[in-house]
Image (cartoon, grey):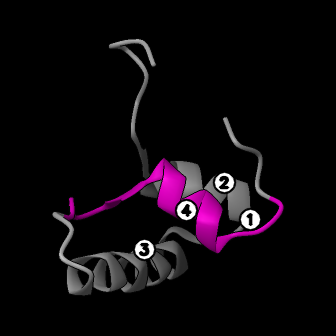
Amino acid sequence: MSTSEKLYYDVNEVAEMLGLSVSTTYKIMREMNKELKKKGYIIVAGKVPKAYFHEKYYGCNNS
C-alpha cells in the first residue's frame, strides 16, 4: 500500500457506488460504523473503511 492510498470511503463515494442518496448512505454508514465500534474498532464519522465496506457489500469493485 502506498502512503497516498486512502483507507476509507467517504459518503459521496459510497453513494455513487451504491446508486443511493447521500442521506440514505449516511444511515448505512452509521450502521456499519456502529458494528465496527461494537467490535472494538476506532471509527471515523462520515467515512467507512474500504475493507469493511467490501466485506459487507458483495459484488462491489475492490478499488
- Distance between mark 3 and mark 4 Cα atoms: 9 Å
Comes first in the chain, label 2 or label 3: 2
Residue at horizontal 76%, vertical 56%? 60
Instruction: Check contact, mark 3 vs mark 4: CB within 8 A.
Output: no
Select label 4 or label 2 by which is in front: 4
- Mark 4 element type: helix
Q: Which amino acid, mark 1?
A: Gly
Q: Where on the picture, by quarter, is residue 58?
A: bottom right
Select label 1 or label 3 by which is in front: 3
Q: Is residue 27 above or below residue 33?
A: below
Q: Which amino acid, mark 3?
A: Met
- Distance between mark 1 and mark 3 Cα atoms: 14 Å
Q: Position of residue 46 (x, y in %)?
A: 30, 62
Q: Where on the picture, by quarter, is residue 54?
A: bottom right
The residue pinned by badge 4 equals: 53
Label 2 CA crowd tier, 10 Å (few <14, some 14–19, many 20+): few
- Distance between mark 4 and mark 1 Cα atoms: 15 Å
- Distance between mark 2 and mark 3 Cα atoms: 13 Å
Indicate yes or no whether the magenta region holds residue 40: no
Comes first in the chain, label 4 or label 1: 1
The residue pinned by badge 3 equals: 29
